[in-house]
Every structure is written in structure tokens, then in C-alpha cells.
């Protein structure tokens, strides 16, 4: 019997290559989103990172508005909004407006990490300490949910109720997801009865434990009666396995730099990465990291995805397409990332 088809989704950090401006990178991502929409992908999420030379995804609500406007069917959301960087009311207002403009298509994924370096984090939070904001994360998540609800939230002020709403007349509400790479987020999502996603594409370890904790501890809520989760994975797919390995190299090198304190820079072109390999001392780390990625021809990649989905008990996989670009690629395009989505979609 044929295997059940997987639901496929996309995570996009809006990478900026050495041959691109920010505008080029955004236009390339809009084209990637249209490719995902046409190929039948379920959702398209953008991340939040700050002050990074290779990442243009600094403001998820702005990107979501552009992507939702450029597509017609696919769900669009954040993977995620880093809530400690923002006032809960502002996040609720942004996503209530997005949902009003694109009803039934908006996901609000919320994370706890800063998504940046310590200095930029300090500026983002106007000097507030981690203790000030992170320790109240659970309350902030619930505040966002209450403010986006159709009935809004009420504040008790001297015995009178002051009503607060994220938007004047909501008829639908974004789907709220909790994201994380630790036990903390798994426990909180289970406690609040929220869907949950573990950052497998970034962490690569602890996924099984976090998902088991979430599933075993889950408490049904008004919006969700059973645990709901999916898997995230880095992927580079090409017509041949050899080409896929080449295309994965720039992102592999960028992740090695991030993990080892190396210089952060715009993402290299494939030929630039090949001409300057990582030092021998880090090649073992690169090989170990590569083993957790889905890299290969369409048949190989589809088999790897199915094995991962079965191992973690999920029916949806969110692909972070990491295939790099060759010299001479149009600056406002990412053909290898688009090919990864098309080839995977056809194979699955």
C-alpha cells in the first residue's frame, strides 16, 4: 500500500546572500512563498531575528502582511514572534489585523528567546532585564490570547471593568502556537492546551523528549482537545544528491560560525563556500550537523522526511529550505530553494 502523504509547510528566515540587498532577499522570499502556495504547502512561517547580516526576517507581522497579500491559499504566520521583545497588546493588535485582512489564514507562533545578541536584546527591551520579561512569559502568552479573542479582555479597575480589544470587531482569531527548544515551552504549551512546535531544525537534540513531555502533560483547552504538533527540519533537495550536498554547504558553514563564535556574515554563494571550507577542527561538528538535515535527491529526501515523521509521530513537517545559490543567480531569486520545495512536494 502507498504511504500516507505528509503535510508539508515552510519556514523562511529570509536569508541575505553576499550578492543581495535586503530588498532582493525579500523579493526572493515572496517568490518562494508563491512557489509553496502553488505546490500545495499548508503554511508558510517567517522567523524573528535581529541585527544579523544574513537574516532579513526582523519583523514577522510586516513580512506576513506582504506574503499573505502575495499568495492566495496558504496559511501564513510567525515561527515565531519573540514575545519578550514586545508588548503583548501590540502583538495582539498586529495579528488581529492580519487575521481580519486574511481570515482563516494567519498563525501566531510565539517564542521566548531573544533572537539576537545581548546588546541588541537590551535595546529591543529598552533596558529591561531577562528576569523582568522571561519570568512573566506565561502570563504574556495568555494576555495575547485574551486580547485577540472576539470578546476581548477586561481589566478590573476599582470595581469597574475596563474593556480591551486588539481590534474593534473580530469575527475570527489567529491560531496560537507555542514554540521552543526546551522543556519549559513544552510544559507551558501542555498546561495551556496550545499547539506546540519544538525547534528540531535548530536544536537537533531533545526533540523526542520535549514532544513526549508535551503529549503526556497535555491538558485539553476550549480551542484544542488533543496535542497538536509538527516537526521542523533543514532541507536541501536537487535533481542529484551531489548537487544537493553542494547547495547545503553555505548554510552549514553559517551554522558552524554561529555555534563556534565565528564571524557572522551574509550567506555565501556556493562557490564562495567551496573555496573557503571550515577549519579542520570544526569539520566533525559540520558532519554531525549535516546528519540531522534532509539533503539529497527527491526520492532520498522524501524517504528521510517520512522516516522522521514516523519517528516523531507527526503528520506534518515544516521544511526550512537551506539550498544556497550559485554564482550568476539573479539577485532577487532563490531558484535552489524553490526547487527544494517543488521537488519535495512532487516526491511526497
Image: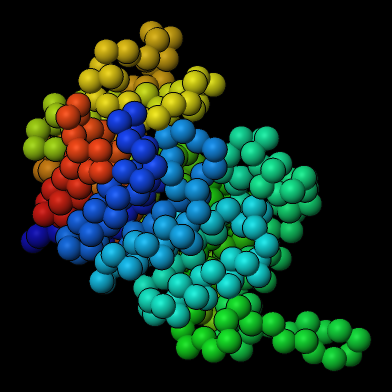
Q: Position of residue 155 (x, y in %)?
A: 78, 82
Locate residue 93 relative to residue 84 in the image: left or right.
left
Q: Position of residue 66 (x, y in %)?
A: 37, 62
348 relative to 291, above or below: below
Q: In the rendered image, which quarter is residue 41 located in? A: bottom left
Residue 145 visible in the current orientation: yes
Between 301 and 218, the residue placed more toward the observer is 301
| Residue at point 12%, 43% (across, down) | 298
Between 98 and 159, the residue placed more toward the observer is 98
Between 233 and 61, the residue placed more toward the observer is 61
Locate residue 263 relative to residue 129 in the image: left or right.
left
Q: In the rendered image, which quarter is residue 200 located in? A: top left
Q: Position of residue 114 (x, y in %)?
A: 61, 45
160 relative to 266, above or below: below
Task: Identify the image's colour scheme: rainbow, by chain, secondary structure or one colour.
Answer: rainbow
Residue 6 visible in the current orientation: no
Q: Position of residue 327 (x, y in %)?
A: 19, 26
Q: In the rendered image, which quarter is residue 315 located in? A: bottom left
Locate residue 121 relative to residue 61 in the image: left or right.
right
| Residue at point 72%, 87% (across, down) | 163
| Residue at point 80%, 89% (across, down) | 161
Q: Farthest residue toward the right?
A: 158
256 relative to 144, above or below: above
Locate residue 204 relative to residue 342 in the image: left or right.
right
| Residue at point 17%, 60% (across, down) | 39
125 relative to 251, above or below: below
Between 302 and 19, the residue placed more toward the observer is 19
Tell how many labels. 0
Q: Quadrant of the C terminus?
A: bottom left
Q: Quadrant of the N terminus?
A: bottom left
Amino acid at each position: 500500500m502507498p504511504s500516507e502523504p505528509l503535510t508539508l509547510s515552510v519556514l523562511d528566515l529570509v536569508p541575505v546572500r553576499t550578492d543581495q540587498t535586503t530588498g532582493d532577499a525579500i523579493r526572493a522570499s515572496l517568490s518562494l512563498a508563491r512557489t509553496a502556495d502553488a505546490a500545495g504547502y499548508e503554511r508558510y512561517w517567517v522567523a524573528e531575528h535581529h541585527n544579523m547580516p544574513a537574516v532579513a526576517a526582523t519583523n514577522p507581522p510586516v513580512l506576513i502582511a506582504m506574503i499573505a497579500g502575495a499568495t492566495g491559499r496558504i496559511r501564513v504566520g510567525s515561527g515565531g514572534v519573540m514575545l519578550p521583545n514586545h508588548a503583548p497588546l501590540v502583538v495582539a493588535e498586529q495579528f488581529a489585523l492580519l487575521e481580519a485582512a486574511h481570515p482563516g489564514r494567519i498563525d501566531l507562533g510565539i517564542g521566548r528567546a531573544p533572537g539576537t545578541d545581548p546588546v541588541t536584546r537590551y535595546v529591543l527591551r529598552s533596558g529591561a532585564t531577562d528576569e523582568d520579561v522571561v519570568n512573566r512569559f506565561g502570563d504574556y502568552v495568555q494576555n495575547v490570547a485574551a486580547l485577540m479573542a472576539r470578546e476581548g479582555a477586561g481589566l478590573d479597575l476599582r470595581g469597574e471593568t475596563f474593556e480591551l480589544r486588539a481590534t474593534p470587531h473580530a469575527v475570527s482569531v489567529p491560531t496560537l502556537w507555542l514554540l521552543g527548544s526546551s522543556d519549559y515551552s513544552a510544559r507551558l504549551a501542555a498546561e495551556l492546551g496550545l499547539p506546540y512546535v519544538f525547534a528540531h531544525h535548530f536544536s537537533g537534540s531533545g526533540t523526542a523528549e520535549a514532544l513526549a513531555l508535551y503529549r503526556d502533560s497535555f491538558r485539553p483547552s476550549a480551542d484544542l482537545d488533543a496535542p497538536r504538533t509538527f516537526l521542523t527540519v533543514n532541507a536541501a533537495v536537487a535533481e542529484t544528491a551531489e548537487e544537493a550536498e553542494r547547495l547545503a554547504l553555505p548554510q552549514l558553514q553559517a551554522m558552524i560560525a554561529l555555534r563556534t563564535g565565528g564571524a557572522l556574515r551574509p550567506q555565501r554563494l556556493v562557490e564562495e563556500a567551496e573555496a573557503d571550507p571550515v577549519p579542520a577542527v570544526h569539520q566533525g561538528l559540520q558532519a554531525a550537523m549535516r546528519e540531522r538535515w534532509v539533503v539529497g535527491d527527491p526520492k532520498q529526501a522524501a524517504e528521510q522526511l517520512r522516516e522522521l515523521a514516523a519517528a516523531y509521530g507527526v503528520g506534518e513537517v515544516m521544511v526550512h529550505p537551506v539550498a544556497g545559490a550559485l554564482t550568476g543567480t539573479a539577485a532577487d531569486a532563490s531558484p535552489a530553494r524553490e526547487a527544494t520545495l517543488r521537488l519535495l512536494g512532487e516526491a511526497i
